[in-house]
Image (tube, rainbow, N blue to C red):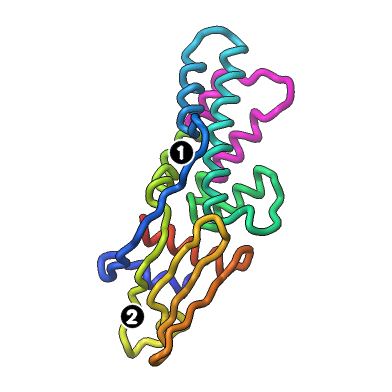
């Protein structure tokens, strides 16, 4: 990824990004569950309110993550259906910063115990970090990277990316299409998950379309 970093100068280069949206089926969205959690925590009804607040915040978190990773093709290849595996996929795709993910997993693990009632402080912390995650990722629902014009560098600078002119994320398929101009010939290369090159391009798209 270090080799690609020099292309992330958004002052010097215009990526002319195109966007796509993530469609949410059903009546409820992740933010709806989060709002329920906020209502629950404001009620003073003991353990019931605390448990409901935690569960609704958890639903908001899991729903948001599932929608995001599905857009990046999580179901296109064999993946473990576990929360840590999904967080790792988010990290690899550059969906959110590793720091937020680490904090999220830490707080979740601290209060994820069967048949115990979390304290109000624990639930407040969890709601705060879920809100942080939602705020950091809501943009993907209407600004999911679709297609960018790759800028290239100076003509006398040659690297493995110098002949690329277009990069496209194909939503839900776990594929990125890289178009190259080699002489008079146009070539398209499809890069699929779970290859590290796929995650490299997903992370790059996420950064240059912020």
Determine if the magenta segment contains residue 111: yes
Above or below 179: residue 31? above
Outermost residue, left side = 11
* Residue 105 % position (x, y): 60, 40
Q: At 70% across and 46% down in the image, what residue appears?
A: 81
Is residue 170 shown left or right of residue 62? left
Q: Residues within 10 Å of mark 2 (few under 14, many from 20)?
A: some
* Residue 107: x %, y % from top left: 59, 34
Q: Is the magenta stretch mostly helix, strand or loop?
A: helix
- Asked if marks 1 and 2 touch (Cβ < 8 Å), the reply is no
Regarding residue 177, the answer to whether it shows in the image is: yes
Instruction: Tell me, yes or no, if residue 122 can be seen here.
Output: no
Identify residue for label 1.
134
Q: Where is residue 132 in the image (x, y as percent from the top left)?
A: 45, 37
Find numbered disc 1 in the image and state the secondary structure of the residue it sits on. helix
* Residue at x 52% of width, y 52% of height: 71
Residue span colored magenta: 101-129
Q: Name the residue under label 2.
A: 153
**In the image as oriented, which residue stretches furthest toward the top?**
45
Left or right: where 142 falls relative to 42: left
At 38% across and 51% down in the image, what residue appears?
143
**Could you tell whether 3 is left or right of 66 in the image?**
left
Q: Residue 68 carries which label?
A: none
**Residue 29 or residue 110, whichever sits in front:** 29
- Residue 139 among magenta residues: no
């Amino acid at each position: 990824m270090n080799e690609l970093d020099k292309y992330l100068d958004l002052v010097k280069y215009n990526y002319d990004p195109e966007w796509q949206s993530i469609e949410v089926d059903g009546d409820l969205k992740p933010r709806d569950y989060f709002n329920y959690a906020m209502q629950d925590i404001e009620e003073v009804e003991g353990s019931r309110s605390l448990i409901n607040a935690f569960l609704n915040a958890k639903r908001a978190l899991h729903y948001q993550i599932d929608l995001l990773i599905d857009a990046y093709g999580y179901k296109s290849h064999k993946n473990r259906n576990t929360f840590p595996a999904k967080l790792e996929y988010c990290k690899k795709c550059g969906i959110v910063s590793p720091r937020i993910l680490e904090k999220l997993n830490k707080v979740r693990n601290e209060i994820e115990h069967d048949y115990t009632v979390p304290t109000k402080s624990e639930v407040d912390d969890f709601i705060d970090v879920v809100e942080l995650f939602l705020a950091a990722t809501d943009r993907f629902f209407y600004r999911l990277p679709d297609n960018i014009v790759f800028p290239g560098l100076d003509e006398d600078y040659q690297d493995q990316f110098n002949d690329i002119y277009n990069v496209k994320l194909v939503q839900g398929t776990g594929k990125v299409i890289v178009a190259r101009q080699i002489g008079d010939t146009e070539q398209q290369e499809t890069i699929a998950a779970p290859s590290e090159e796929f995650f490299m391009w997903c992370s790059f798209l996420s950064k240059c379309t912020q």
